[in-house]
Each structure stands twice: as C-alpha cells, then as structure tokens.
Image (cartoon, coloured by chain):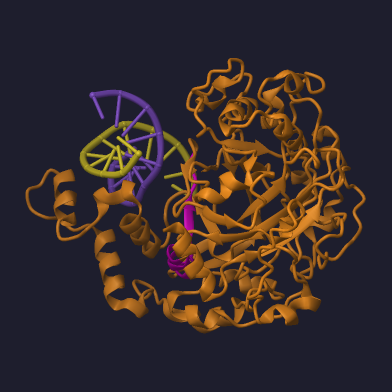
Chain colours: A orange, B yellow, C purple
Amino acid sequence: MLQEKASAVADEGMTVAQLGGRPELASDSSHLGLPTTPSIPQNNEPDKNIENIKVVLHDRELWKKFHEAGTEMIITKAGRRMFPSYKVKVTGMNPKTKYILLTDIIPADDHRYKFCDNKWMVAGKAEPAMPGRLYVHPDSPATGAHWMRQLVSFQKLKLTNNHLDPFGHIILNSMHKYQPRLHIVKADENNAFGSKNTAYCTHVFHETAFISVTSYQNHKITQLKIENNPFAKGFRGSDEGDLRVSRLQGKDYPVISKNMVRQRLISSHGHLSGKLGTGVLSSHSQVVSHYQYDSGVPLPNSDSQEALSHSFPSSRESSLLYHCFKHRDNTRHLDLGCKRPYLDTTASAVSEEHYFRSPPSYDPPLLSHPYCSEALGSREACMYGGVEGETGGAVGTDDLPAPSLNCNMWASVQPYPRYGMQTVESVQYQPFTAHFNSTASAVPHHSSSMQRPHPAPPDLVTFTTQRVLQSTASSASSSPSGPASRDRAHSSLFHRNPGSPLRSQRDFTGYPNHSPTSTRESAYQFQTGLSSVGPHWTDS
DNA sequence: TCTCGCACTTC
DNA sequence: CGAAGTGCGAG
C-alpha cells in the first residue's frame, strides 16, 4: 500500500525527492521538467549512490491540505507531536548499507508572525534561534533494506516551546515559521566517521512547513486537525459533535460552540473561507505571487517580507502555486564536519552579521555542522550546549555494546534561511567533511553539485556543534544490528539531564542497562549548540 | 499569549 | 486497564 501510494505520488510529479543533485539555479532549467527520470536505481552501484535515494512524503495530500490553509503546529512545555506526522517512503538505498535518518526543523525565515484578520502577517523580527535539536529516527542506524521496507515515521518527534526542555524535544519559538528537513546519512563502516567521504543528503518537503503556535489561530487548521487526527476524534462534529459539546457543558441539549460555528461557516463557504469575521480573502492574489514553485526546484523568494506573509497560500490558490519564482539558490548543505566539541564551535560562532543578514540570495542554511565530540559519555552534554560531557572521549561509546549515537548532535542551522518554500523537496547531498567548517567560504548556496564538498557558507554556519553524526556513524558500523540495541543508547544520551530526571522520557533509561526492552520509540532528539548566537543576533 | 486541567480519544 | 495524545476554555 504504501508503496503504491508512494508511487502514485511520484507519478504526480513532484513529490519525490531526488537526491542527487541538487540542482542549482543553473541547472534549474534542466530540472524544470522535473527530472522524471531520475536516476533511479541502478543497483549497480551499491554504496555510493546516496544521491539516488528517493524519498516520498507520506500522506502528502493531507499535508497539502494543511499547507494550503497555513499549517500550524502546537508547541507546549511538555512537548507536542506534529500532526500530520512526518513519515516518508524511502527507495533507492543500498539494502546492505547502513544509514542514519534524522530530522531537524529550521527557521523558515527571520520573522515573527501574528494572525490578524484571518491571515498570517509578519509581526517583527524573529527571536533568536533556539538550540537546534535533531531528532534521530529510533531505528538508526539501520540498513537500507530496513528503511525501505516500510514507511519511516517520525511521528514521535515532539515540539516544545520550553527553551530548557530536558526531554530532548525540538525547541521552537512560538509564532515563527519553520521547515522540517530529513537527512539521510550513510553510516557504513567504510564511511565511518572520520572518513571524509561520508555522504549524506537532505530532503525538504515544502508542504511540511508550519508556523508554531501555542494555540491554534486559524480555525481551518483546527478543523483539519480534528477531522484527521484520531486523538481529536472527540471533537468531531458530525451530527453528534454538538452533543458532545453539550455534554461537556452539562447540558442535555446540543450546544454549539462559537468555534464550531465558525468552522462550519467556513467550511460551508468553501472558498470563501476566510471570510469569517474579518475579511479574509484578501490575500489571495498576493499569495499567488509569492508562493510558487517550479517544477520541483525550490525557489527562494526574493521578496522576503511579502513572501513571508503569504507563505501559506490559501486553498484557492493552490493551483496557482506552481509557478516559478526566481530564486537564487537552492542549495543547502549539510556539513557534517565533526570533531570538535561543540562548545568550541559554539564559541566560534560566526559572525552574526553573516547569519542574520543573509541576503535573500542566501538560501537557508540547511544544514548545519555537526560536530562530533568524542566524548559521548555524557548525555547531558547532548542536551545542553553548555554542559559538556566529561567523559572524555568516547568513553561510553566505544565500550558500549551497542553503539548508538551517543551524544551525537547536529546542529541545525538556525539562521534563517530565507527560502521560500520549496515545492518539491530538494535534496542535497554532500560528503561529510570531517572538520568543522569554520571556514566558511562564502559559498553561495548554489552550489554544490552534488558531490563536491562544500564548506558551508558563513551564514549557514551555525554555532552549533554536533556530535552526532560521527559517532553515530562509527557506532553504526559496529553496532550489532538491530536498531533495537542502539535505541537505548541513544536515548540515554540525549535526554538525560542532570538535574532533571525526565520521567517522560524513559528512553534513556536504557542507557546504563542494556535492557532490551528499551523501546525504540524513544526519540532521539538532539540539540545543537546554540546559544551564543542569540545575543548578537537580535537585531537592534 | 500562554498554561493548566478537563473529557475524550487511541494504543 | 492505564498511558499517552487531542482540542477546549477558563484563568
């Protein structure tokens, strides 16, 4: 089934993310047609074709519905799952090669938003980026066969607005726009960390972009959540919904809430949707202009302000969306350099100027640099940037039976990328670099052809450090096999916080003990360093 | 704006 | 059954 679905989507055209190369502007034209032909599968080349990996967003239609209305994701102190959940179908991997799949969520732009007149508007400059945390899929590392066998779900990933979150959830600022990304890192022995050739690729599905909120702003979104999220079934209105409401209120007769009324009105009006209280339709035309995509190639929008405000086209315009706008570069890379404790890196953080002022031309920093610290023992380190694990060197890891991603962290890039959304996902692929790149070259995003190693552009560079990949990779190779074993390890690292025991995250529990039971559900969410940036960044 | 407890749901 | 994921609405 999935397969079918996936293929169907692919047929439609745009959803498949192709890796290989990220087309740059220059190449855009060639890609416009959409690379239908992708390089598919030539199985001949086993390990090396990370660029041939294809990823299809599961439930894309649902995501599109949300996107057209302006997706909102609730963020809470305790952590809230995303809905729709981020699930993908992966094909084109070498069945025997091990890969690590992880996601991160980066700022889509540098604005803060407000919901007025039934639409999202820019309301100032974004808050300093939060620590970029990564969510490593619990099965990582696992073989290509494992990943391709079924849908890869990131459903347990949670979002929080608690900057001091001890659970390892991904920290976001409310009322800001974000873009989830998927990274696939080859974790084979051959590419174990240290190797400069470790390859990875990044996939971005523009339809998964969202604005984080503490409570829903757009009732259309509320409605979609209620209608599609099984856990919200209790709020469904179908004929009986009213009854539920009434019961809640202790009444025997149906009571209709304002919200429900609004929603119903809206839905009934269909296209007029927005019009509820305040005029709403307004932005349509504008929207169109901003959000367009090319066939597959993401185009950054040059007009930042406007684009942003209209990022979410209303449903009506959806058809219009697929236009092209010019953009500068699509490239995004991940830099996985590793090797420095992330603290250091952090410090080095880049000049704020670069980051923040990235001209429109810059693309979003898609990636970040991971740093790998050798030390992995401490979980805390992972969680908090400031804290470093003391365990020196890989202590734990090496010894651990099941290597896991011990404290690996990636840093996701914070600065805002200003990319408009991309229609299709873009993929990027790059070799891992072993070092941190402080060297930023100002590479334009453009870049990269696929294979070329790129230093990250300064703007992209974030301070964050990451430890993760590396260790992950290396461990992966050694790891026994099952994802299960590593699960616990991972989790343990990340979530544990010295002072705070996290109950909810029992994930880590496993750490010390090897109990097999550890659930693989544990989420692996890592944080990247960050901090230093904040201060500088805020604009004045 | 955000936090909390609630009733309801899925798993 | 209990744990955990939902939006609601009062505060």
Q: Residue at x 52, y 46 (%)?
A: A154
Residue A507, x across and y down, in percent: 53, 27
Q: Would you say A258 lies left or right of A338 here?
A: left
- Decide which of A252, A367 is in the foreground and name it: A367
Up/down of A526 relative to A400, above or below: below
Is A81 in the magenta? no
Up/down of A285 relative to A339, above or below: below
* Residue A176 appears in the figure: no
Q: Residue at x 74, y 41 (%)?
A: A188
* Residue A279 appears in the figure: yes
Is A66 in the magenta? yes
Residue A484, x across and y down, in percent: 56, 30
The quarter of the picture where residue A269 lies is: bottom left
The quarter of the picture where residue A5 lies is: bottom left
Quadrant, the N terminus of chain A: bottom left
Residue A102, x across and y down, in percent: 63, 45
Residue most extreme to the front = A44
- Decide which of A204, A290 is in the foreground and name it: A204
Q: Would you say C8 lies left or right of A78 here?
A: left
The region drawn magenta spans A61-76
